[in-house]
Image: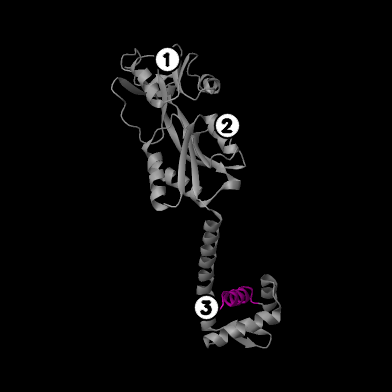
Amino acid sequence: MLLKQMQYFITVAKYQSFTEAAEQCFISQSAISQQIKSLEKELGVELLKREGRQFSLTPAGEYFYRHGKVLLDEIEDFKDEVIRRGEDSELSLKIGYLKNFSVVELYQAIADLTETYPEVNISIESGTHEELFELLVNQQIDIIISEQRRAFHEDYYNYELKYSHCYVEISTKHPLSEKECLNVEDLKKYSCILVTSKGEEESERVFYENTLKLSQRFLYTDSLDQARLMVIGNRGYLPVDEIGHLPEPLPGIKRIPLCRKNKPIQRNYFACWSKDKTNYYIEEFAELLRQLLN
């Protein structure tokens, strides 16, 4: 029994017409009729009950049609996966995330994907919001995890992960450390510590000063660990987002909710990747991370 014969019969049964089925399969009507007769001969049963120019499905034909459709769909999926694996000499997934994004769920999602798909070579890179988008646009990275700073672009999938709760990490020696909530107005005269790359200080300053209205005095470092050491030394405060599980603050640091007019501030985090470059592994990773975060 040939797959083509299965496809011809299922198409005839679907459209209830040899003529239309022949058009759909790009074959002559006489040829498709002959192929179905050959199929019946091989099986030793009638699939169609012919009555002049009309026909109906026999019980065997009904069974063949229902289960054959499922089988053909599975074969198509199987074929697509074989082709995809054959075209990819090395399966890879390049993930970008923010320098100040430090949650165990990100590491867990990468570990889970690696365990499920050991054939995928996963690489990760951290950067600022603007650096990550430049890498994505230039196709140097497949998917980024970032907070929303601009309107979503229609050429990209923008897969919302979770709204974060915003906090400030501040020295236990700081005069504001006893507050239950820190309003942005409380922080105006104190230095804000930003985790950023060299050359990206200005774009980060503009966002935190003009959009979040946090401060007008900034200090910069390129690592989260260094930023927290600066907090312990009471050199300034560090804004952090709780999108997943945050570890307990280090000794000497107090973590306090960040508010605006006594209302907690939240920020939208999402995964972003090009619609032209989407694939199963990108989508699987995004969904894994979303489930872990929620």
What mark, if any, has residue 248 been given in the picture?
none
Is residue 74 in view from this perspective?
Answer: yes
What residue does disc 3 label?
A: 64
The C terminus - image quarter: top left
- State left or right for residue 87 relative to residue 290: right
Q: x and y percent of residue 86 in the render?
A: 54, 58
Q: In what element is the residue under mark 2?
A: loop
Q: x and y percent of residue 175 in the render?
A: 34, 12
Reply above or below: 30 against 189. Answer: below
Q: Residues within 10 Å of mark 2 (few under 14, many from 20)?
A: few
Q: x and y percent of residue 13 in the render?
A: 60, 76
User: Residue 252 in magenta?
Assistant: no
The N terminus - image quarter: bottom right
Mark 3 → mark 1, Cα distance in angstroms: 73 Å
What residue does disc 2 label?
A: 150
What residue span does the magenta drawing correspond to?
1-16
What color scheme is it? one colour
Q: x and y percent of residue 235 in the render?
A: 39, 14
Q: In what element is the residue under mark 3?
A: helix
Type of the residue with mark 1: Asp
Mark 2 → mark 1, Cα distance in angstroms: 26 Å
Reply above or below: 257 against 163. Answer: above
To which quarter of the image does residue 244 belong?
Answer: top left
In the depicted view, which residue is nearer to us: 200 or 266?
200
What residue does disc 1 label?
A: 186
